[in-house]
Image (tube, rainbow, N blue to C red):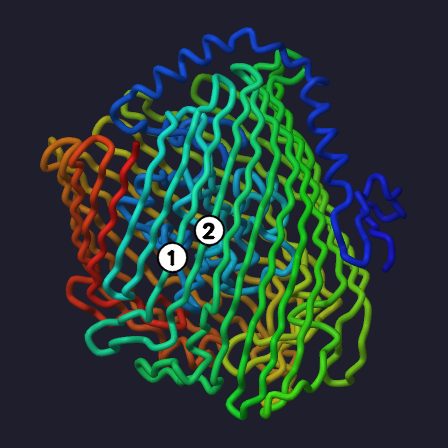
Amino acid sequence: MKPLNLLGNSVPPIFLFQTVESKRTVKPLRSLLASLFLLVFLVNIPNTSNAQSNASTSAKSSDIDSPVQLSSVVVSATADEIPVADAPYSLAVIEAEDLRLSQMARTLPEALRNQPSVMVQKTAHGQGSPFIRGFTGFRTLLQVDGVRINNSIFREGPNQYWATVDPLSLKRMELVHGPGSTLYGSDAIGGSLNVYTYDREAPPQNGFYYRYSTAEDSHMGRVEIDQELNQNLILQGGFSYKDYGDLEGGKDVGKQKGTGYDEWDADGRAILSLHDDAFMLFGFQRVSQSDVPRTHKTVDGISWKGTEIGKELQRNQDQDRSLGTIQLHLENAGSWYEELHAGISLQQTEEARDRVRDDGRRDVSGIDVNTFGATLQFHSDSDWGQWVYGTDFYLDQVDSFRDDFNADGSFKGSQAQGPVADGAEVANIGLYLQNTKQLSDQYELILGGRFTHIDTQADRFEDPLSGDVKSLSHDDQSVVGSARILTHLDKQQGLRAFAGLSQGFRAPNLSDLTRLDSARSNEIETPSPDLDPEHFLTAEVGLKVENETLQAEAAFYHTWIDDMIVRTPTGEIIDGEQEITKRNGGNGYVQGVELSGNWFFADAWSLRGIAAWQDGEVDTFPTSDPEKVREPLSRLMPTTIGATLRHELQPKTIWLEAEVRAAAKADKLSTRDQSDTQRIPPGGTPSYVVGDLRMGWHPTQLWHVTIALENVADEDYRVHGSGLNEAGRNLVLATQYRF
């Protein structure tokens, strides 16, 4: 394999953290771990003279009877802790109690279904992919505790990876709409989601959680341990088990055969306080999903409103992901920097697909990815404002395979690659700088920029028409910037306005360059090794208000799309499927309006609402003819509204909610939407209106019970682009006990 080329020249192995061996292990992990511990002493951390005071504070926190309310701050938008209302972005913070006991979220993507400009598509019941401002898959970014989950095998369009984060393990989620490439690099186009698994301020609490749903006869359970071993060390951990049966649709659809699956999740953390302003985090999580069916591709699929039933006898996916991280967080350093945040991580992703075609032929394919990450971020104050700057580095090592079997079960042979190139490495390094300047008592300006270089090397990928096996050497670099301003229009009423102009980019990854696998209905995607980065520019303006009776925001955005990588048919047929390749050339736009708010209009009464409108077009190549055609953006989100009326029947004891969600008909279809006949009905996905009822009860301060009747009218409906219908009338019970 060729040496990685990060900066245009050969770079010494010590800088590259080179790790190439036959077993592809990450050799520098031990030395970097030692380096991180050494950093603890190099940053002049004082001794634990405040330990006794810290222990006293912790003891007081542990005696609090009621659950702790997390402060309304956001970190992901600017890398600084600031109030949500003061962030010049459209965003949302979702906290653990809302995830578990109000929404009773089954998966991470489903936890976002009540956010404006977010459409949660589900190809399968065990998968989910949010469309954020028109983009999904590798054009949205997911991070766990600041560690990048996106890697070089993420696919275009909906994929399953967001569903490999257990929502029951989270303390809070921060969703930022729009480009985040200045701070986070490639992929952060439609939006960024950063989820957090720990909260240093919350008192330690052990507990258990259970959720049951009738529509899928499912059981979700979790046991948690949260112990303060001494004044400096907290240990946390949890184990979740999930058993999902086949999903029952609405009154006419009935049971959707072949949709159930099993999952288990485990996570653990050690939080070591070095002193009041410094701590280390040692974290681990693992998710394992077994036999998740992609039902719409198989004979178990349903025909709904004219959709076609798949032909495959079986298509099951196993998914395993683990993440280990070690982080150092230092505040109030009193040096040339005020804060330091450093970390290393190792993520392992394993996936395997077992497919049986209609003629009995079987193939088993899969991908293994080891991703090593290292991040370093500083915060400094100066006369010119507050500075955030740093670097991040991620290295993917990818192995890919495919084994074919004859209809009689005999082994036929192995392919040169699986879904992506085999024997690949992708190095991603970035440098960024951001300044926040208080121009006056009324205006605040944020300026930022980033340089990113991505180098891709692959040993083996196959041209399916010629049968040639090739290698790949590809590098991309990009410079992006962002400017955002916030102004206080009326401080007494909490009225603010913001505006922003932000660039975003996405470098072609292994899935773009070397994919050889199924795409949409009856399509096979083949390698396209000569692609360039995509570029985006988003302008947005918005209003925010936050006072005693109203918390709301409204935003309009327009994103210019330049050189987006688009799929196009070649006219060739490979093994009965239409060949699809990729090319740059998708110029266009997406724009929209998003509204959200919570109105406390009377004692114990509140009304929350969301609304979103979206429109977009992009140049495509609908046929093998090289002529471009301007078409609607694929799987464009229809106009959507939602409202939730809440009443505190007995404050802090009993609450009631009534919710309604509605979406217009999704009939703005691209050519490829129209050909996706197994998921999108002819003429588009029908409109729907769905109502839910919920009640929560606190028998004690530590015990909570929620019961909900979802889809009260038992409507048949599906989210646009999904491979199955949503649940019909569904009774859901959730309970949580802390001790």
- Disc 1 from disc 2: Cα separation: 9 Å
Seen as rendered, the residue at the extreme front is 229
Residue 418, picture quadrant:
bottom right
* Quarter the N terminus occupies: bottom right
Q: Residue 113's mark? A: none
Q: Amino acid at mark 2?
A: Asp
Q: Residue 265's mark? A: 2
In the rendering, at what x and y percent does residue 374 appear? Answer: 68, 38
- Position of 194 with respect to 258 (left or right) is right
Query: Mark 1 near mark 2, Cβ–Cβ under 8 Å?
Result: yes
Q: Amino acid at mark 1?
A: Lys
- Asked whether the viewer can see residue 572, the reply is no
The residue that appears at 41% across and 70% down in the rendered structure is 721
Q: Dot 2 lies on which element?
A: strand
Tell which circle, 1 or 2, labels the residue nearer the N-terminal end.
1
Q: Dot 1 lies on which element?
A: strand
| Residue matched to label 1 | 242
